[in-house]
Image (cartoon, rainbow, N blue to C red):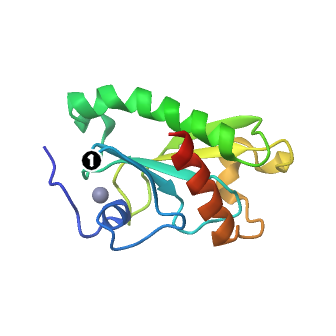
Amino acid sequence: MSERWSTDCLACRVNQGIDNPPGGIIYDDGLWRVDHRIDPGPILGWLIMKPVRHVEFFDELTDDEAERFGLVKKRIVQALRLSVPDRPEKVYSILLAESSDCPHIHFHIVPRLNSHPREFRGPRIFGYDGPTIESAKVEDLANLMREKL
Ligand SMILES: [Zn+2]
């Protein structure tokens, strides 16, 4: 089993409260944690769902973490769909963990609205560079989601 934390890992830094995403912790049950993207980016509700523990491969999850995963993810997507101001047409779920500062597995849970430019749909959403969402909007969304979870 891997170490609980890695000092070189952005997800671990967030999970330890060293770095703080806007809106604070949306969900944390001791196994899984969900918060908004730390750099809010151009999409309100772009969430990061990750194990609390430093894990680099999905098959390194404990059975408890793996069992909890499905129910937590369902509840998060449901709360997100009920909380974003415009109903998402799709909710993406993407696990890459490719960047050198974050080998920790983390799902990008991204509400894709009808108004989202067609050329930045699907995996191209990572290239979308619209105006950054204001922190206050992220905080409002996080508060709404916490009420629904
Ligand atoms: Zn980590």
Q: Residue at x 49, y 67 (%)?
A: 21
- The spot of residue 139 in percent (x, y) is 60, 63
Query: Which quadrant contains ligand 1?
Result: bottom left
- Residue 88 location (% of width, % of height): 75, 39
Residue 134 vs residue 100: left or right?
A: right
- In the current view of this chain or complex, which residue is farthest to the front? 147
In this rendering, position of residue 19 left or right of residue 2: right
Q: Quadrant of residue 121?
A: top right
Image x and y of residue 23, in percent: 54, 63
Q: Amino acid at mark 1?
A: Val
Whole-percent x, y for residue 94 in the image: 54, 41
Q: Is residue 106 visible?
A: no
Horizontal relation, residue 131 to residue 38: left or right: right
**Residue displayed at 70% across by 67% down:** 133
**SS for dot 1:** loop
Residue that badge 1 annotates: 55
Which residue is at 77% across, 65% downward?
130
Q: Is residue 6 above or below residue 78?
A: below
Towards the viewer: 148 or 46: 148
Q: Residue at coordinates 63% horizontally, 46% vertically from top-left?
A: 110
Few, some or many residues within 10 Å of mark 1 (<14, 14–19, 20+): many
Furthest-bottom residue in view?
18
The CB of the residue at mark 1 lies under 8 Å from ligand 1? yes
Q: Is residue 11 above or below residue 80?
A: below
- Classify the position of the N terminus by image quarter: top left
Q: Is residue 100 above or below residue 67?
A: below
Q: Can residue 27 be seen? A: yes
Q: Image check: 44 left or right of 64?
A: right
Q: Depth check: 51 or 100 in front? A: 51
Identify the image quadrant of residue 126.
bottom right
User: Looking at the image, how many numbered discs can be counted on the residues?
Assistant: 1
